[in-house]
Amino acid sequence: MRQRMFLRAAFAVLLAASVLPASAQAIGDLVDTAHFPIDPARSFGVGGSTDQKLAQTLTVEVGGHVTGVFLSITCSTGRLAVELRNVVMDMPGTTVLARQEVRADRIRGYFGKFAYVKMPGDLRVYAGTRLAIVVTNEKGSCSLYQSADPGTYAGGKGWFETLPNPPGWLPFSDFPGDPDDLPFQLVVSPT
């Protein structure tokens, strides 16, 4: 009986470790690159009837093993997929370097705060590496809060792909009034 309770507790801890609030960042990890300002009054949809996908390209500043990303996101249904992809011609590429799926009810993005999504695997990045954080939800919907400070992140920019548009990424900057970037933080272990 004790062993079963221990296993349940261990499983709960492991499950909780896949999505944690910002205050739970592991000691020794660091935010490599980020765009912080969040506008909790404005958000972009992820998934839903238009199957909208969002992305943020970025440039790694220090490097290390990627341990996760912080996103200003909240989900109501489905499963959020967070991918790290290559960047081709400044746009999100098709090569998935790391991927994590999280049940919607595990996303704890609150107004003005970030939700941490732990990335599996052993992805090592170096200063100057270009990456894209891509978020999708094929069977549900999420909201990713917009940036309160448009156009200030020089290492990349925000992108979207949605129906009924033809396939392909469009930059937020093509639409006046929308910020050029998504709030994010890339977390690495420098070891």
Image (cartoon, rainbow, N blue to C red):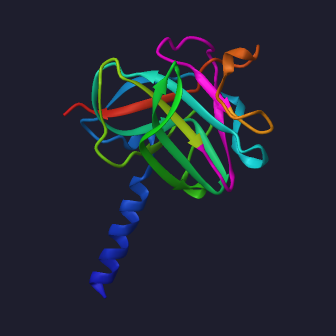
Q: Quadrant of the C terminus?
A: top left
Q: Residue furthest left?
A: 191
Coordinates of residue 35 in the picture (x, y in percent): 50, 21
Hey, which quadrant is residue 172 in on the image? Answer: top right
Rendered view: 123 above or below 62: below
Q: Which region shows up in magenta?
A: 136-160
Q: Quadrant of the N terminus?
A: bottom left
- Name the foreground residue: 103 vs 72: 103
At horizontal 72% and vertical 15% (from top left) the residue drawn is: 174
Q: Is residue 112 left or right of residue 49?
A: left
- Name the foreground residue: 74 vs 132: 132
Instruction: Evaluate whether residue 30 shows in this view.
Output: yes
- Name the foreground residue: 157 vs 10: 157
Question: Is 57 within the magenta?
Answer: no
Q: Report the label total.
A: 0
Instruction: Evaluate whether residue 38 shows in this view.
Output: no
Coordinates of residue 33 in the picture (x, y in percent): 40, 23
Hey, which quadrant is residue 181 in on the image? Answer: top right
At horizontal 62% and vertical 26% (from top left) the residue drawn is: 159
Hey, which quadrant is residue 78 in on the image? Answer: bottom right
At horizontal 52% and vertical 54% (from top left) the residue drawn is: 102
Coordinates of residue 54 in the picture (x, y in percent): 62, 34
Rendered view: 44 above or below 20: above
Question: Is 148 within the magenta?
Answer: yes
Coordinates of residue 31 in the picture (x, y in percent): 36, 28
At horizontal 69% and vertical 54% (from top left) the residue drawn is: 140
